[in-house]
Amino acid sequence: MHRLPLAFACLALAACSSPNPYVASSLPLPPAPPQAASTFDASAYPATPRDYSRYQSWAWLNDHLPAGNALASPEEIAEAVSEGLDQRGLRPARIGTMPGLRVSAEVVTERRLRQVQDSYYGGGPYYGGPYGGGYYAPPVVRTYEYQVMVVRLRLFDGSSLQEVWNTQAETANQGSQSQRADALRAAVGKALSAYPPR
């Protein structure tokens, strides 16, 4: 009985040592179609990185100021955006010349929710222990709704009108008219802080 497993093992080893009946072979690749030499497949290559340094000037998209609303007039939005672009090295295009960028801006109000948890002692069930006890009340969670001013900017290539960059930032929507104007400029500056992208 002890020799039977040994015999099976010998047979298995003999089978492994037998020559492989399969022989590797390869066929030549078929010839490329005639149009392959003159066809360029751009999707097979990564897109060329955009050179943002060539954008030196800008103008409004469709030559229209951004729409105003209850938060800010078109002139106030245009002034804030113009100041922000100027700080990024972009100058208004001269009349009659092709701008490097076309710019659109939008200022809207959006609602946000914030939760605040208040934990305090008193008024709840009494819990005793070896070192004394006390009254404990479970934490109270309050939800507040507040409004923010959101600034959205989109930049388009001046010749192709292809969108090349977009951004947005938000700020508190409260205070006087002058305070909201300052908040608008701060939001535009925050939105443009990552331009040009690296």
Image (tube, rainbow, N blue to C red):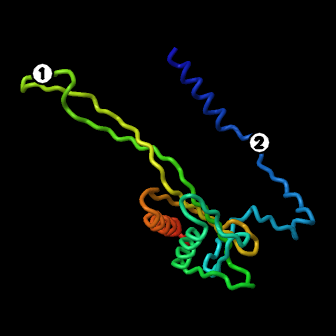
Give x and y (percent) for residue 20: 72, 41
Give x and y (percent) for residue 136: 20, 27
Callout 2 touching callout 1 (CB < 8 Å): no
Figure quadrant of residue 74 = bottom right
Lower position in the chain sequence, tag 2 or tag 1: 2
Amino acid beneath label 2: Tyr
Comparing 14 with 150, the one in front is: 150
Name the quadrant of the C terminus. Answer: bottom right
Give x and y (percent) for residue 27: 84, 54
Give the residue at x 88% y 62%.
Answer: 32
123 relative to 74, above or below? above
Please name the residue that numbered disc 1 is placed on. Answer: 128
Amino acid beneath label 1: Gly
> In the shown orientation, is residue 121 left or right of residue 176?
left
43 relative to 130, above or below? below
Tell me, for residue 22, which label it has, or none. Answer: 2
> In the shown orientation, is residue 163 left or right of residue 174?
right
Give the residue at x 57% y 62%.
Answer: 167
Give the residue at x 77% y 48%.
Answer: 24
